[in-house]
Amino acid sequence: MNPTRKYPGAAAPAVHYMRGIAFLLAFLFHLTIHAQPAGKARLTGRITDAASGEALTGATVQSGGQYGTTTDLQGRYILDLPPGEHTISIRLISFAEKQVQLKLEDGENRTLDLALSTSAQELKLVVVSAGRFEQRIEDVTVSMEVIKPAIIENNNSTSMEDAMQFIPGVNIVDGQANIRGGSGWSYGAGSRVQVLCDDLPQLAADANDAKWSFLPVENLEQVEVIKGASSVLFGSSALNGVINIRTAYPKDTPITKINYFAAAYDKAKLSLDGITYRLDWWGSAPRTYSGMNFFHSRKQGRFDLVVGGNMFYDEGYRQGEDEQRARINLNTRYRFAKIEGLSAGVNFNAMKTEGTLFFLWMNDSTGAYRPAPGTLSDYTTYRTNVDPFITYVDTKGNSHKLRTRWFNTTNENNTNQNSTADLYYAEYQYQKRFSDQVTLTGGLLNSSSKVNSELYGNHTARQQAGYLQADLKWKFITLSLGGRVEQNRINDETDDWVPVYRSGINLHVLKETYLRASYGQGYRYPSIAERFVRTNVGALIVYPNEDLTAERGYSSEIGMKQGLKAGAWAGYLDLAVFQNNYDNMMEFCFAQWGTFTDPLAGNGFRSFNVGDTRIRGAEITLVGAGALYRDLRLNVLAGYTYMDPQQLTYDSLYITKVGLENYRGSDSSDFLKYRFKHLIRFDAELVWKAYSLGANVRYNSYMENIDRIFVTGLFDFAFPPGLGIGHYRKFRDKGDTVVDLRAGWQANKHFRASVVVKNVFNYIYMARPADMQPPRVWVLQVGFQF
């Protein structure tokens, strides 16, 4: 094997670009130290929310276009000005601008405290992920969705994986996030979607997968989803998009929340070919699950503290499968008094999970909730992260952030697949804001991994990167331009520096009409699991591929966002047409990778560079909230996504190995495997005084193409009397619709009770081959807040 993998023409430009980023960061840092505005007068004060009295962080305090600053974490500011008359403007997204005229004398120190009122004309969705600074969602140049904590709580989402299914254009198959058809099914290894919590990567060091139950559903500010390649700011795994979970820091008033829920699985029946099969192997005693979330936040002087946790126990609706887990998280931050704008802290999260994992059903009839022989595995997993950080925002609005992480994943099981993976991550980010029109964001990062595993072997990995992005807002135009260089290494094999770029424009053409266009390149390096895994599930083997190479691609989009308003109800309608191209795409494929002496004569699954692909599509999204009439409120999040994922070219080595027809899959077309053509997501809730009624609808069209092995008779020899996947698909070829209903009662500000019925029509369906989803579930949920 070649110890250095080459990308023609990439190395030299990338090195120069890396040097350019480092030089510009140093130059901007120099400006923050030496660029002092003229004048001998000083204006200080605190900016707060007029409604709540809470400090407002990041508000711009400006005099003309030359002098300006932003408020710190306590809402305070310091602005040095020359003597004379000034018009002071205070701005913050979602708040009405306030202007104050004053005259300062030479040597004067004046205090000016102000309270800002919210703008009633806006939906007030503010996002950070698009440029790593606060922007109104109308102004960003890419497609984004925002999920608020209420929709997650009200639907009784027991993990972030459940919550992601509400987002238009997003579906998750076996834990793998898929945005607009960008990914298929890869047995939990590798992700084209970068998952973050407070801008720090959440993908494990070994499999490069998201541990969804590890993410803090009890402590959320909001969840932001970027659709399309975002590798410039977020690195290799953001080839298909980004999911950024933003946690909440304390307000001025302490808050304690406790949420308890208990649920029971209903009886289950499945009708195929005119025959009805009973699936509820458990008999008359129902299977149940229950859990509890808690959350407490408070400020103690200059110290911020957030403590949260989750406990969950699931008896399981599939025979032999169960899960119990406990998690606790802690966020701390100290705001220094002697150095205004300086803060530091440590975040911590730890979880232990025990259970039994189900992989393949016995068959599609009476055995749909029973495991195929030899496919159950007992496991104990530990997840821990410790995240020290330092932030400094000076009086000129320059921001310096140093964020670090240690992330450990430890897996123990009874199938000789134990593994321990440690990720060490450090990122320095600098941001320079020139008034409120230009924002420069740059950063340098280093990530290293160490994996000791029976499953993959022992390996080390490293990633280095530098990035720079400029965002300009001028009159009705918003521009964004950025670039990144990244280098990856596994063991002694080092790739060249790889550059990626992005650009976008947003035009505010009418009062509530915004047009946008964007282009972004992406890059994904294979995970340790994809290259080195060798394991088995029963007689089915997953083979390694040490020759797997990185994939590259781009996303392009044209979109329009139209603001909507009806009385006190505000929202927007978003339309987008998109195209994603992937070169040298990695896919999880079935073929004869082993020898004839292996089980199934060497046939099994393996990750492989299959060739070039293209995904075209369109999407429409409706978001809104507010009062329709007096005390009647409506909250809605809905979307329809059309996708056409196609294989354009095939890797010649792969086709020689497996044959074109086998690769093409169950329907012998060029439609990419394990994708849907149509997705519909709809969530709406009516609130009248203390009562609420909501519905959630999810539709996935028929999964047109899967591996041919699942619809042939080969599995009949490995798992007698056969899995029946082809039989099931013959009678379930119209797609799947699942409906949830919920009703809630807010007794007072301290107590809320609700009933949630998941899968209200008791529709039994398959998410991926041989993985039947749960029947109807009845949930009782009570919440306390103090």
Image: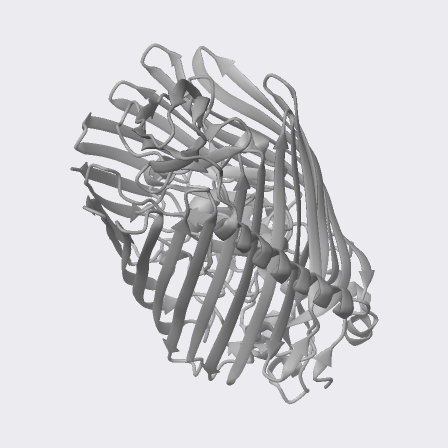
Task: Please identify the residue farthest to the front as the structure is shown.
Answer: 106
Q: Position of residue 425 (x, y in %)?
A: 46, 67
Q: Residue at x 51, y 53 (%)?
A: 430
Q: Residue at x 70, y 53 (%)?
A: 501
Q: Tell whether 165 sits left or right of 348.
A: right
Q: Quadrant of residue 533?
A: bottom right
- Is the C terminus in the top left, top right, bottom left or bottom right quadrant? top left
Q: Quadrant of residue 79?
A: top left
Q: Position of residue 525 (x, y in %)?
A: 63, 67
Q: Tell whether 710 sits left or right of 164.
A: right
Q: Tell whether 621 sits left or right of 558.
A: left
Give the camera-side residue of 417 and 425.
Answer: 425
Q: Residue at x 33, y 40 (%)?
A: 153
Above or below, comparing residue 145 to residue 7 in the picture: above
Q: Position of residue 394 (x, y in %)?
A: 42, 47
The number of callouts visible is 0
Give the camera-side residue of 176 and 757.
Answer: 176
Q: Position of residue 632 (x, y in %)?
A: 35, 15
State how the image is colored: one colour
Q: Residue at x 49, y 71 (%)?
A: 205
- Is residue 202 visible in this depiction of the protein? yes
Q: Tell whether 495 sits left or right of 321.
A: right
Above or below, comparing residue 689 to residue 604 in the picture: above
Above or below, comparing residue 699 to residue 705 in the picture: above
Give the camera-side residue of 473 and 582.
Answer: 473
- Is the N terminus in the top left, top right, bottom left or bottom right quadrant? bottom right
- Is residue 207 visible in this depiction of the protein? no
Above or below, comparing residue 248 to residue 728 in the picture: above
